[in-house]
Image (tube, rainbow, N blue to C red):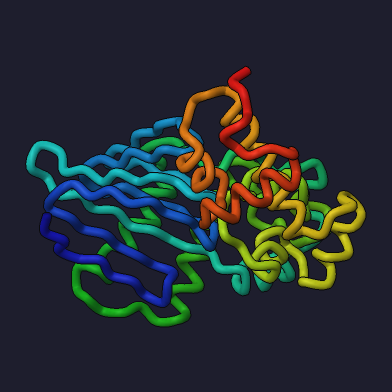
Amino acid sequence: MEELKVLDYSNVFIASYFTDNWECSHANAEHTLIYLVSGELEITDNGKKTILRPGGCAFMRRDHRMLLQKRVKEGVPYHSVVLKFNRKFLREYYSSLAKNSIPLDARRSKKSLTVLPANRPDIRSLFESILPYFESGSKPSDAVLQLKMTEGLYVLLNTDANLYASLFDFTDPWKIDLIEFMNENYMHELSMEEMASYTGRSLASFKRDFKKVSELPPLKWIINRRLEAAYDLICRGTANITDVCYQVGFKNLSHFSKVFKEKYGMAPTAVTVC
């Protein structure tokens, strides 16, 4: 496989250009807007496959892991452009909004992937204005970066008003539900600081809010949730013990067996198939 070009400007604009197929597991630390110039992109999110073709555009919500398969089609290289929205920019933009312009009935979608209408003029105009920077290899100024990020926000907010709640989920009305977040991410290795940041809270606020919804501290909650998931998988008989251990997030088989026995009074191998 030949990787021709991956250009990253301030982790805001990112262009990928490949002459052969490429597959990667991708975790979005920031909200991301991706536009396909050529080739084909298959996105697998929670087992569901979505295909993007040239002119296609999709919004990927932050803090979710997806499998991306980038393909050359009919000899034409894969070429995509990504626009990322970091928290600093989103906070500054939100603070500049007239509060009466914010839809109070906006609700954060549970979907981590939103496909935008293909070949929409405002989307095409935005990304076609970005492409020359990559083609010439010249880095855009900070002012241009800010301008294009703002245009990208307009694209999203004009697509669905509920995206206000996803993009600005660091604010109290749209603060991410803790248990929902934990249930979606218990199998990943996250520090307390990361869990706080991903749910739109300071570390102190995260600990305080978590006490309201659980008698267990966050890290003990995660271990307990992993064990419950492991028991269910073993009971169903769909995977062996080692696979289950790593699938639910444990990194050490002996530690998994120890804490499993402490919780259920038996070794994982003693669980009977339901």
Q: Is residue 33 above or below residue 240?
A: below
> What is the quadrant of residue 6 in the picture?
bottom left
Q: Which quadrant would the N terminus be assigned to in this image?
A: bottom left
Q: Judge by depth and name the residue closer to the eye, 266 or 72.
A: 266
Does residue 119 appear left or right of residue 237 in this picture?
left
Q: Judge by depth and name the residue closer to the eye, 81 or 67.
A: 67
Does residue 270 appear left or right of residue 180 in this picture?
left
Q: Where in the figure is residue 182, as x and y percent of width and height?
A: 70, 49
Q: Where in the figure is residue 12, as x and y percent of width and height?
A: 44, 69
Q: Which quadrant would the C terminus be assigned to in this image?
A: top right
Q: Is residue 76 above or below residue 143?
A: above
Query: Going by the picture, which residue comes out furthest to the left?
Result: 75
Q: Is residue 225 visible?
A: yes
Q: Where in the figure is residue 4, as x and y percent of width and height?
A: 14, 63
> What is the quadrant of residue 184 in the picture?
top right
Q: How many marks?
A: 0
Q: Where in the figure is residue 240, as x and y percent of width and height?
A: 47, 34
Does residue 60 appear left or right of residue 92 in this picture?
left
User: In the image, what residue occupies the spot 45% across and 30% down?
Assistant: 48
User: In the image, what residue occupies the spot 45% across and 81% down?
Assistant: 142
Q: Judge by depth and name the residue closer to the eye, 228 or 100.
A: 228
Q: Is residue 269 above or below residue 251?
A: above
User: In the image, what residue occupies the spot 77% across and 71% down?
Assistant: 202
Query: Going by the picture, which residue comes out furthest to the top?
Result: 274
User: In the image, what residue occupies the spot 82% across and 55% down?
Assistant: 100
Q: Is residue 154 visible?
A: no
